Image: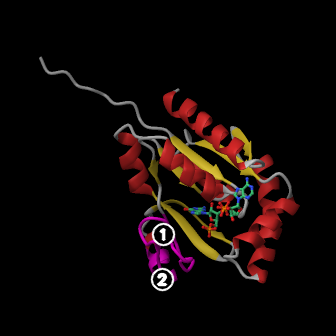
Amino acid sequence: MMTTMIKNRGKILVFSAPSGAGKTTLLSYLLETVPGLVYSVSATTRKPRQGEVNGKHYFFLSEEEFRQRAANDEFAEWELVHGNYYGTPRLFVESVVSRGASIVMDIDVFGKKKLDCVFPEAVGILITPPSIEELEKRLRLRKTDDESTILVRLENARTEMEFAAGEGKYEYTIVNDDLERAKEKISKLTRTIING
Ligand code: ADP
Ligand code: 5GP
């Protein structure tokens, strides 16, 4: 007799945070320490920062390529964030979760809202800085953005946090105050979600 194994779908974990809150730091830790998680590599028209690798951190596209892919409906969601386009390749997400693996996404709060229309089961986790002053400090210390970019990101942080608290659907919030404590929290929470 033939038996058919039906695998449970993997979980979709969406992490959002204002720029500089520490999301990249926390997600790198998470992906290194929790086995089996797959990272959803977004497409962007932003220029690569030092050390960023095409296909690993982002797929770096020209605006024309990005528009073409959006028109072909290749993105589960896409957004203009801080003046650049960012989008989540849809088929990759589907292929990961349908084989039972869990996927981790790093997308902005408006993109998360759009993603909910395509993947309503996505679990939202908001990472916040302890204060706007601390956020500003971290953006400056990171030394990856010029002054005008930092100011845009700080201004956007207020709008993003308001949206996340209102229309955004975030089941969990992690305050990234002490880094070691935040690492522990993100790791424990993720294990609970993917095993639940
Ligand atoms: P994001 O990806 O959210 O923009 P990053 O992970 O790049 O943020 O972090 C921004 C800066 O803040 C980096 O220089 C990082 O080393 C630092 N950072 C991250 N978490 C903390 C923390 N808990 N306390 C102090 N600095 C932090
Ligand atoms: P950064 O340029 O600092 O890497 O990212 C800037 C912002 O773009 C962050 O808030 C990040 O979460 C968001 N982002 C990255 N990829 C995507 C994506 O695929 N879709 C959306 N909507 N936002 C994204």
Total numbered circles = 2
Residue occupying the point 52% across, 81% down: 63
Residue, far top: 1
The tag on residue 64 is: 2
Q: Which residue is mark 1?
A: 70
Residue, far left: 1
Task: Say if mark 2 contacts mark 1, CB within 8 Å.
Answer: no
Nearer-N-terminus badge (2/1) = 2
Q: Secondary structure at mark 1?
A: helix
Lateral position of residue 112 relative to residue 150, left or right: left
Query: Ligand 1 sits in which quadrant?
Result: bottom right
How many angstroms separate mark 2 from mark 1 (CA)? 10 Å
Image: 32 above or below 63? above
Residue 83 in view here: yes
Q: Is residue 165 or residue 77 the one in the foreground? A: 165
Image: 96 above or below 146? above
Q: Which residues are magenta?
A: 42-68
Q: Report the amino acid beneath label 1.
A: Ala
Image: 161 above or below 65? above
Q: Report the amino acid beneath label 2.
A: Glu
Lateral position of residue 16 relative to residue 134, left or right: left
Crowding at mark 1 (Cα within 10 Å: few <14, some 14-19, many 20+): some
Q: Is residue 73 or residue 35 the one in the foreground? A: 35
Q: Position of residue 93 (x, y in %)?
A: 43, 51
Crowding at mark 2 (Cα within 10 Å: few <14, some 14-19, many 20+): few
Q: Position of residue 118 (x, y in %)?
A: 52, 49
Residue occupying the point 34% across, 40% down: 99
The tag on residue 175 is: none
Residue occupying the point 44% across, 76% down: 68
